């Protein structure tokens, strides 16, 4: 018999840096146990922000799925800027096609794209909205 789902939560934590707090408390899970499991699973991604999808069950058990780092963070890192433009018509930096492809290949599991070209278009759109140009 399957467990009854109590809640599904989408949260973001620094890799290896999850700590008990209000965000986890609202998920209704065993916070220390989650933190240990999450930190062990993300210790090789230090410095990244890791989105996680937590499924909490009525018996306080849980499962979680790690997602890839948000494209905006990867684009800012590749362009060497601290933040995107406040107006999408303004340009604050640029990335190369090679960097764009690398980000798209990394993001493929989480994107609604059938191939790398489509994923590159999705990531390029994010970059454009952030005021980051894609150059040859």
Image: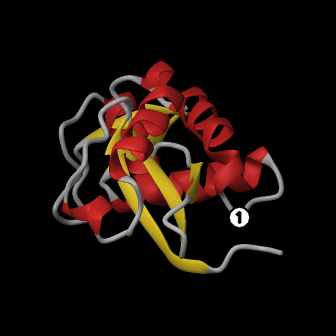
Residue 80: percent from the left, percent from the top?
Answer: 27, 28
115 on left or right of 11: right
108 on left or right of 2: left
Label 1 neighbour load within 10 Å: few <14, some 14-19, many 20+: few
Question: Which of the two residues, 45 or 57, is positioned nearer the viewer here?
Answer: 57
Residue 55: percent from the left, percent from the top?
Answer: 56, 66
Residue 124: percent from the left, percent from the top?
Answer: 53, 52
Indicate whether 122 appears above or below 134. below
58 on left or right of 84: right
Tell me what residue is drawn at x 42 percent, y 43 percent.
33
Q: How is the image coloured?
A: secondary structure
Tell me what residue is drawn at x 16 percent, y 62 percent.
86
Tell me the quarter of the image containing the C terminus: top right
Tell me what residue is drawn at x 78 percent, y 74 percent.
2
Residue 133: percent from the left, percent from the top?
Answer: 40, 45
Indicate whether 38 appears above or below 27. above
Quarter of the view holding residue 30: bottom left
Tell me what residue is drawn at x 38 percent, y 59 percent.
11
Q: How many marks?
A: 1
User: Which residue does the numbered mark 1 point to in the structure image?
Assistant: 112
Tell me the quarter of the image containing the N terminus: bottom right
Dot 1: element: loop
């Amino acid at each position: 018999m399957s467990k009854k789902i109590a809640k599904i939560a989408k949260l973001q934590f620094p890799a290896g840096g999850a700590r008990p707090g209000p965000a986890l408390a609202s998920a209704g899970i065993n916070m220390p146990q989650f933190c240990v499991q999450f930190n062990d699973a993300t210790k090789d991604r230090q410095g990244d922000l890791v989105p996680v999808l937590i499924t909490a069950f009525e018996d306080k058990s849980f499962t979680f799925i790690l997602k890839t780092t948000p494209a905006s963070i990867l684009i800012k890192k590749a362009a060497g800027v601290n933040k995107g433009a406040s107006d999408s018509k303004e340009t604050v930096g640029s990335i190369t096609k090679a960097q764009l492809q690398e980000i798209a290949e990394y993001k493929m599991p989480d994107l609604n794209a059938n191939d790398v070209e489509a994923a590159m278009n999705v990531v390029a759109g994010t970059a454009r909205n952030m005021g980051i140009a894609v150059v040859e």
